[in-house]
Amino acid sequence: MLDETLKNRFGFETFKPGQKEIIEHVLNQTDTLGILPTGSGKSLCYQLPTYIKEQPTLIISPLISLMDDQVMQLKRHGEHHVACIHSGMDETERTQNAKQLANSRFIFLSPEFLLQPHNFKLVKSLDLGMIVLDEAHCLSEWGYDFRPHYALIGKIVNHFQNATILALTATAPSYLSYDLKQILNKSFYVVKTTMNRDNISLSHKNFADDEEKLKWLLPTLEHAGPTIIYVSSKKMCLTLAQKIYSYGFLTGIYHGDLSYQERHTVQHQFLNNEIPIIVATSAFGMGINKKDIRTIVHFHLSTSPSNYMQEIGRAGRDGEQSQAISLYQPDDNFLLETLLFTDIVTIEDVESFELGQFLPPEKSEVLEILYGHYTYQQLRTIFEISYKRKRLGYMRMLGYKNLDQCRRAYMIEFFEEKLSEKPKQCCDNDSEINKINILNRKKVKRKMDFNEKLQNLFK
């Protein structure tokens, strides 16, 4: 039955690894955590059961770009019973989608939207067959200090007692199952294939300073194919993009402070190969369904193995050979530590909040959202554990820069996974890596003065 539905509804002859097992458990009403690598068809794991169950599915999604991409893909394949509401829409669009909720087969909403009582009224009477937690690692990565509403998703899930929960992610730290149980009060059957992507080679380069990084990077981009360059800050986004543009390449920037329309435009240009290079913070990637990204460069190291594996996983979704290259110079250490630890909520912040003392508005807002659902002691424990996890992931990434063993094995070991077989182009420590050789044409040309233009007319 499943194979027949797969062929008739989606046009595929066979399932990819992990898909069928996840779908079978979901149809048996088993709450399931599916861990499948980027590009392995996680969306199918909720779409196919939705058609079989003939009940609406709520997809709780972390990013606007992710919602937009999945809605677009569904509509492209003929599905029109789709509703999506997010902050990038104008009032008319939001109103239209709100009216469609009751008749929709797929409903895409953020946790922040759902946890507002007047918004929850729109869906609370629906007979949901499934609730999907898309990019479920966000519950662990973002679930307290960055996106505190993620830590309250249990309020939504527990309202729909008859709905099966499907959590999906490409990267799962060992504690994700524990976090899901703590936040949702539910146990999950885990289906895990591998986080390893054989077609992405791993390399790392150490430099004395950023100028040396640039001397290596700029000529490398000439033959890197479609490329994402990850940087640590919005300021660096603009600075680096300007240097690449001056070197001759059309270049887009992407960070959290851009408007919805600006982000949408950059994504569209990149998807359509109008610009070959994106310089971005970690805000870019989820929901960017571009299969031919050949190169991922980390101008600054990621702050955790989870982020790193997510970000490099955006390369080579078509299965073709791709490359992930990270760069480091000594000043990066301070930069990354500042980025990771300066604004986190600490045990001391919880104690100050309990005593009614002043806190920065961002921290105060986080604790106000969480307070009432958690006791002060629970909050102290939560943020102590959060700090230790961040420190552990950060130290793992610092170890990556001077590694003399297999980079691939080192990285997936963090997720309690062992490398069964090394690909031919594994990493720069144990393989002869063939560089990607796909030309990025230089499209930025020097402006001609009037006399030059005049001369060209008569050539």
Image (spheres, helix red, strand yellow):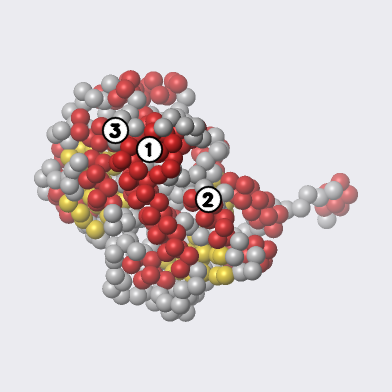
Alpha carbon separation for disc pair 2 and 3: 28 Å
- For the point 65% across and 62% down, the residue is 210
Going by the numbered disc 3, the residue's amino acid type is His
Residue 209, by quadrant, is: bottom right
Name the residue nearer the viewer: 447 or 340.
340
Residue 430, by quadrant, is: bottom left
Q: Is residue 453 visible?
A: yes
User: Which numbered disc flags the more N-terminal residue, 2 or 3?
Assistant: 2
Quarter that holds the C terminus: bottom right
Disc 3: which residue: 373
- For the point 33% across and 67% down, the residue is 413
Q: Is residue 132 left or right of residue 423?
A: left
Name the disc covering residue 148, or none.
1
In front of the other: label 2 or label 3?
A: 3
Name the residue nearer the viewer: 363 or 331.
363
Q: Is residue 299 visible?
A: no
User: Which numbered disc flags the more N-terminal residue, 3 or 1?
Assistant: 1
Q: For numbered disc 3, what is the local secondary structure?
A: loop
In front of the other: label 3 or label 1?
A: 3
Label 3 Cα neighbours within 10 Å, binned few <14 / some 14-19 / many ≥20? few
Disc 2: which residue: 339
